[in-house]
Image: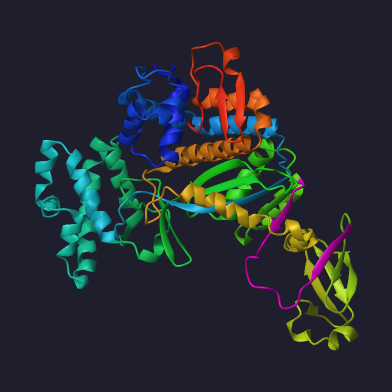
Amino acid sequence: SRPNAPVNSLVASIILMYRNNWTTEALFDRIDFDLLTRTALGLDTLDDTPFCPATFFNFQNRLLSHFVETGQNLIERVFDSLTQEQLKTLKIKTNIQRSDSFMAMSNIRSYSRTQLLIEMLIRLHRILSDDDKKRFNDILSPYIKQTSGQYLYDLERQQIPHEQEKLAMLYQSLYHGLKDKYKDVEVFGIFERVYTEHFTVVDEKMNIKDSKELDGSTLQSPDDIDATYRKKRSEHYKGQSVNITETANPDNELELITDVAVCSNNTDDSEILNDRLETIVEKTPDLEELHTDGAYGSEANDRKMEELEIDHVQTAVRGKKAEVAMEIEEVCEGDYTVTCPKQTVRSQKTKIRYKACFDTKICEQCPLNNSCPAKQQSDKRTYYFDRSDYLLGKRNRNIKSLPPERRKLRPNVEATVKEFTKPFNHKGKLKVRGLFKTMVYAHAMAISINFGRVWRYLGKNPEYFALRKLGFCILDGLFGRIAGNSRDKRWKLNIRDKSRCWPTSRWNFNRAA
């Protein structure tokens, strides 16, 4: 059932909170005393209070519960619905788009491995019954008298390996002694995860795993079980990765974000794109050209792009540049021409792939002879390839086939990334933790960024205010009231100048939203 408060006001408050980087306390302070915020939420009088803090927190908890039960992020559905209406009404071309990703670091403490193991013991001790605390008091007492950081501070570096061996035996004892009683308790579940990730049995003895055996998916903090680790360009990140896609047709007067995806930050960009391609095409069926950087290229993406008839344009190529370029062109289905720096030949079909046979007399005179990928055979040099090699070469050449004005469409997506990361703190961290809250943040920010672009565009083009299906579909559906004056009255607008829109009734949305 719906909450006992206007849902649009609750959603709008989430958007405003993330957009302006407010704390929850600051949000309610604004709702109580800031007229612009109250107007944006559709509050007519100073006496109106849309909801209390408890309702706001319960609403967010219900969003999370719905996501856990169904896998649906309702804020994402709001974003998709609004974006489709904006694209349709403003007639924005979506056949050319661009994509990029950024790291969203979780608001968690950075633990060393030993400190994390000790911290989990302290957290586990808190949820034990009094009897169990007495039962394990002797082995836990050295750790629970102080914080994990304080305990670690007193250790010498050479003592750490021995301490880890002690922790291995302690974890084994606690796990087997508590698993039957606490198996359904959340904290014990996190403890069990740490136990299985960091320890292993070798010759019937519990040992700590070598650090090389741990990957980025191991638990980074008990406060955020979804956070993963990734090292990128010598920088260390713990949290999630956000991928955004937006329109990029040069004919558009404004560009809108069409898709937002949040994944673990150790997921490669090419995998994220492969997972989102069909969703993006479902939202924008006319997509023909997608601009990305070199990180998005992969064999799987090449096949999917071909299947969906999308040209993948990369501004850079991942990997080492070939010393001798072999250009493969498709003449017709199953028939190719292969061009090296000195000659062009037709392909021949083998059982599982294709081959191109080059004249050895010409090859012997080529200065690149020693670096050629074609293999020397008795009377010829043969280059073997398959469909994936053709698609790879096609992707790498796509940017050269475009007119100059369309070769530099991708970099502008960096400005959109900057809008998303503006609320981050000086360490590049969000104010929230967890995958779902990062998803809510990303989609709320996308809604506000699109709304800001549309609002600025309407301010510069006042004639568009006549298109009431857009103007108040957004304002009424997102920031408006549930009940009040008749809808017809709210459509009447007087255009005073290019930057102001005054409704004829007492509604005043000037710069409020």
- Relative to 355, is 421 above or below? above
Q: Can residue 423 be seen here?
A: yes
Q: Main secondary structure of the magenta part?
A: loop
- Please name whichever residue, 496 or 361, is drawn nearer the observer in this view of the structure: 496
The quarter of the image holding the N terminus is: top left
Across and down, in percent, residue 265 comes to: 47, 53
Position in image of residue 254 (x %, y %): 65, 43
Indicate whether 361 appears above or below 166. Answer: below
Q: Is residue 476 left or right of residue 346?
A: left
Specify how the rendered protein is coloured: rainbow
Q: Closest to the observer: 142 or 132?
A: 142
Residue 357 included in the magenta stretch of the image: no
Q: Which residue appears at 17% of the width and 53% of the height?
A: 147
Q: Which residue range is magenta in the image?
A: 309-331
Nearest the camera: 238 or 71? 238
Quadrant in the rendering for residue 163: bottom left
- Residue 433 shown left or right of residue 483 in the figure: left
Q: Can I make out residue 467 in this image?
A: no
Report the front residue among 324 and 44. 44
Q: Residue at x 51, y 52 (%)?
A: 418
Q: Does the magenta run of residues contain 313?
A: yes
Q: Is residue 50 above or below residue 166?
A: above
Residue farthest front in this picture: 496
Q: Position of residue 455 (x, y in %)?
A: 58, 35
The residue under the point 60% across, 60% down is: 295
Instruction: Say if 276 sits above or below 361 in the image.
Output: above
Pinpoint residue 42: horizontal percent, then vertical percent.
Answer: 46, 22
Q: How many numbered discs, if any?
A: 0
